[in-house]
Image (spheres, rainbow, N blue to C red):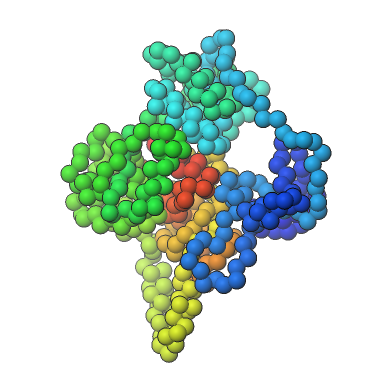
Amino acid sequence: MSGYDYSTGKADTKFAIGEGDLVVSAYQPKGMFAQILLEPEAAMVDSNTYDITAWSLLHAHGLEAFAVKLRIDPISKGYDFAKQNNTTATTPYAYLVPWNSMQAARFLAEVVKNGVVCRYAELAFRVAGKDWPAGTLVVTKGDNRKHPDFDRTVQAAANRLNLAMTPVQTGFVEAGHDLGSDAMRLIAAPKVLVLSGEKTWNNEFGQVWFYFDKDISYPTTIVDAVQLSGMELKDFNVLVLPEGSFDFDDVMLGKLGDWVSGGGKLIAIGNATTALSDKKGFNLAKFAKTVDKDSVLKETDRLALDHRTALFKDRSRSSISDFNPGAVVRVKMDKSHPLALGLKDYYFSLKTSSLRYDLLKDAWNVGYLEEDYLSHGFIGANVKKQLKNSAVFAVQRKGSGQVVYLVDNPLFRSFWEEGKLLFSNAVFLVN
């Protein structure tokens, strides 16, 4: 069978339907609604718009998907999603949980909150005849010898979330690194501080709050951004800057830099990254080379000269070339980095601004737009050109800590499910 491949944007791609695949038919009473939710390119009467122009749920959930013109009728009544029962009579050496969904993130948040020590596999391995990918959660009895109710706590969390969890009786693997090796990276329990107040944008702060409070039920401390300068940060190991307009002075930037170097993790989302851009101690820069900056300035000047006789009545129409109301872009990912664990080679990101940075020097460019990146929806011509070879997600090692730059907001409106998993990586796995 062949059809349109959502991951590549190419038609007539060969694929096969297998057991467990979801088939959504357009031949149903809600067929038009399904079309709206699943179409890769939304039809627009006018590109001069104020809101996002692409929203396919298949990209939002990071699914491998195809659209076909052929009618496919189901041959069964449906798929039986069996209730998981993770209760075991014996005490295993470890429990293994695949890291590929928000259910896994909710499980991790719950057990960590209840004092369970967890690790994740930095590399793939094979144990008890089954292959496990990098990112797999490894929860061992040995790490939790002092926990008063270890097995019940872990099993109850998995059962409540209907999450499949595999017990194994040995730490020796058939391929890869043993479960007791340093390739199983310890997950430090996040002690999270989130900035709020007038310096943050209300909706974007709300998205961060919703993630922690509703999506994963994990405790945070929330403070007004204006109070940050007077706070002791030593009680926290994660600081989240929601999208906003922060004007940190050199003293505050030095304080943040020292805290990160001492082991803290600073996560800057969207426009919050501008507070760190081109600042001492932070590797985020609009231009990596002076020649690139000069080239852009020359092009900007040329465009200004060309528009000297533009008509006032055309001002709105002519400005959209420098505007991005919201489009979906395909981001190349480094799957070996903790920030990308559980994701695919490409991540479809909802880009809602023209914010753009060069690929970082002396940092890990975990997600970036390639020269010929694929996009869905409307992006102004000038913006689309400038976004080539730009950083989307990056991690800078600074002393004993990390700075995580999320140029695109993965929590936008709380419906980009794969973005939530990426943000979970930033909170729990990047350390």
Residue that lies at the very extreme toward the bottom in this rendered image: 309
Q: Residue at x 46, y 48 (%)?
A: 411
Q: Residue at x 56, y 9 (%)?
A: 90
Q: Quadrant of residue 277?
A: bottom left
Residue 140 placement (x, y as % from top left) = 48, 19
Residue that lies at the very extreme toward the front in this rendered image: 29
The quadrant of the picture occupied by the C terminus is top left
Residue 26 seen:
yes
Q: Residue at x 52, y 58 (%)?
A: 369
User: Could you tell whether 97 is left or right of 36 in the image?
Assistant: left
The residue closer to the viewer here, 372 or 29, is 29
User: Could you tell whether 229 is left or right of 414 in the image?
Assistant: left
Residue 362 seen:
no
Q: Residue at x 49, y 34 (%)?
A: 105
Residue 162 placement (x, y as % from top left) = 57, 27
Q: Quadrant of residue 213?
A: top left
Residue 253 in the image: above or below residue 263? below
The residue closer to the viewer here, 209 or 301, is 209
Residue 191 placement (x, y as % from top left) = 33, 34
Residue 117 placement (x, y as % from top left) = 42, 23
**Number of marks drawn:** 0
User: Could you tell whether 108 is left or right of 398 in the image?
Assistant: right
Q: Quadrant of residue 98?
A: top right
